[in-house]
Amino acid sequence: MRVKEIFENKVKEAIIKAVEKGELQGINAVNDFKFFCEVPKNKEFGDFAINISSLSRYAKLPPVKIAEIIKNNINADNFDINIVAGFINFKLHEKLLIGILLEILSKKENYGKINLGNGKKVNIEYVSANPTGPFHIGHGRWAAIGSSLAEILKFTGYDVFQEFYINDAGAQIKRLGKSLENRVKELQGENVVWEEDLYKGDYLIPCAEKYIKDNMGMNFEEFAKADMLNLQKELLEKFQTHFDLFFSETSLYKNNEVKACLDELKKRNKLYEKDGAVWFKSSEYTDSQDRVLKKSDGTNTYLTADIAYHINKLKRSDLLIDIWGADHHGYIPRMKAAIDALGYNSDNLEVLLGQLVNIIENGEAVRMGKRKKMVTLGELVDEVGVDSTRYWMLMRSIDTTLDFDVELAKTKSDKNPVFYAQYAHARCASILRKATEESVDIVTKETVAPYVLTDEFNNKINNPVINSIFSDDEKSNESIKNLLLRLEEFKSVVEVSSRLRAPYMICKYLQDLACDLHHFYNFTRVMCDDKEKGNVRLLIVYAVKNVLKQGFSLLKVSAPEKM
């Protein structure tokens, strides 16, 4: 149980006692009241606080009087209580802080794990770019967020399946094939007239060279699609983004799933003909108007195959999570309408809408676009690195536009958020190495035995005996307490980031934990003369390293041992 929950429960139990004793007349449904444990702005008041002022309107008593009554009904074990106006403040004793450390040492890489999902099958679909060229920067943001969210959901008890939808059945594939044909002709010395809607990027030149060398009997469309998709898959793997399935849109037609959906909608009287087209009665549901599924020329709209695809996923999953660009917001109500019309529950579809990424280079925004010279995700990763690119893509909420400062992301300094967080992990690793390795006295040049032997320290991790974590130094004690409370906060952050589908909260937490670790290091001598205290401080460092590593793993960012 989290520390905040302990105090929330203590207050609820105390109110029930007070009501039963007739001390809080007018209050009878205590379970309907919501109490939130917060960190007070003034740390002198306590480590945590709960505002009970809302009870005043029911009990007809001043908040401070109600708070006193509640306080008198709490058995204060391992904490002190004081009242400030309508706030009940709690100050932790050392024993509670030791409990936090012992829990981390006991659970290790499972610290923070909770079972929110209870094995619920979740299908996360993201990136899903047309196989018509390299990924742009926005695809990188969806890749980072989707793959990190998958890790967070797995960590919180969901059965996660990651999927990439290949839009390979539309006119864009024909244009891609024609574009490759033009590049091949140019390489063979022919003059080519480019139509306006073709893909003119230089990225098709290597593809054309491969085609000339060995086209394996494939036509231009097949060859270009296969080559582009291979390039996309290679970059995704490099970018620490793994998909369980690359689902081809064309398979929906081959397996008659698109036709089956149209037939079912017709059977349910959800279609009608108008102006030679087939319309879906989506306005009967969540949509603002009806939508065309089959155009007057007999071809299907994008929506038609997408409906079939989502029904396919719903047959395999309990919950669908799609990550789309913000410009697709109008697509949500029509997709939910189709799901409901076909007898499924549209509440089982969640859509996360992502804002754009602005690449800032030398203080200026860099333009991107498939049909012009571009800054691709691959180019960005090559310049900045996988870790920095992923971390920067994850640092902001998905519904916020992200300014990606290329120069800052490359900087090895505290100003670069990913460097700052990773350095905290490397610092922990360095402290632990120095503690368990021999050293040389700089004056006598003699070999000095390790502060603690590796086997001995491992035994302390697995069988910890901790009597005290504090010393006579108040600043050191404060830094230790803040660090341990921050470690305890990891459990709450994991839960909330899972519930809100918000990996950026893990990034913010790692920044805060790194800050507390550096503060602790500045005010606390770890390997001090008092070996008992020193070993406990090493256990604290080990705990910080453990939680940092777990946080990085949820982001799919590396946790370096040295920097």
Image (cartoon, rainbow, N blue to C red):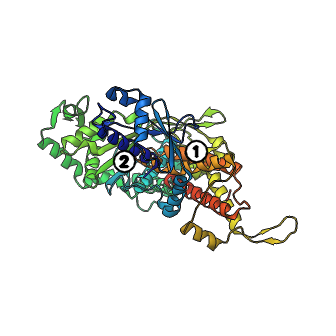
Residue 284: tell me if it is visible: yes
Compare residues 175 and 423 and report the one nearer the observer: 423
How much space separates mark 2 and mark 1, taking CA atoms?
Answer: 41 Å
Mark 2 residue element: loop
Amino acid type shown at disc 2? Asn
Few, some or many residues within 10 Å of mark 2 (<14, 14–19, 20+): many
**Horizontal and vertical percent for residue 101?**
54, 57
**Horizontal and vertical percent for residue 342?**
19, 44
Few, some or many residues within 10 Å of mark 1 (<14, 14–19, 20+): some
Residue 504 position (above or below residue 147): above
Residue 453 position (above or below residue 329): below
Compare residues 315 and 114 and report the one nearer the observer: 114
Residue 167, which numbered label? 2
Image quarter of residue 434? bottom right
Q: Which residue is at 62% across, 47% downward?
A: 516
On the rendered structure, is 395 left or right of 530? Answer: left
In the picture of the structure, the residue carrying the numbered disc 1 is 512
Mark 1 residue element: helix
> Mark 2 against mark 1, which lies toward the viewer?
1
**Horizontal and vertical percent for residue 236?**
49, 54
| Label 2 or label 1, whichever comes before in sequence order | 2
The quarter of the picture where the C terminus appears is: bottom right
Compare residues 401 and 194 and report the one nearer the observer: 401
Amino acid type shown at disc 1? Asp
